[in-house]
Image (cartoon, helix red, strand yellow):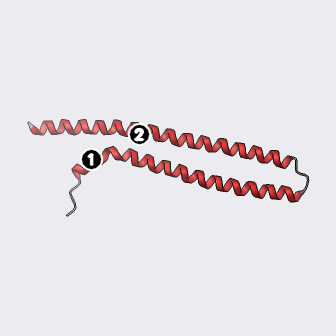
Amino acid sequence: MAKVEEIQNFGKDQLESIAASASSMQSGVQAIATAYGDYAKKSFEDTKSFVEKISGVKSPDKVIEAQTEFARSSYETFVAEAQKIAGLYTDLAKQAYKPYEGLIAKFTPAAR
């Protein structure tokens, strides 16, 4: 009879793991979507500011200077945001896997 109880407990553990994983994935995906939205908004505002800045410039040297500064700033922002979002994806993967660690440990033989 103990075998039936073990199977029931195993099934219960799996359902709890799935529920925990789904909950953590939801918050992780939401954080990623928010990060993408924030980056898009910042990029749009920076581009708008750049266009306003060069629209009033008369000399070609100042336009090139402004364009160079904008390109450098845009690249730095992109790299920083890409690293931030990559970290969020890493956290999401870790959170999604965490509930299954206990179940996997039950079936993985101990290293000797």
Q: Is residue 49 left or right of residue 79?
A: right
Q: Report the amino acid beneath label 1.
A: Gly
Q: Position of residue 60 (x, y in %)?
A: 88, 57
Which quadrant: the N terminus? top left
Q: Which residue is mark 1?
A: 102
Q: Which residue is mark 2?
A: 24
Label 2, residues with CA under 10 Å away: few <14, some 14-19, many ≥20: many
Label 1, residues with CA under 10 Å away: few <14, some 14-19, many ≥20: few
Q: Quadrant of residue 10?
A: top left
How many marks can you see?
2
The answer to whether 103 is drawn above or below residue 112 in the figure is above
Q: Residue at x 68, y 46 (%)?
A: 43
User: In front here: 24 or 2?
Assistant: 24
Q: Position of residue 12 (x, y in %)?
A: 24, 35
Q: Position of residue 32 (x, y in %)?
A: 52, 43
Q: Residue at x 66, y 41 (%)?
A: 41
- Residue at the extreme right of the image, as rendered: 58
Q: Residue at x 88, y 51 (%)?
A: 57
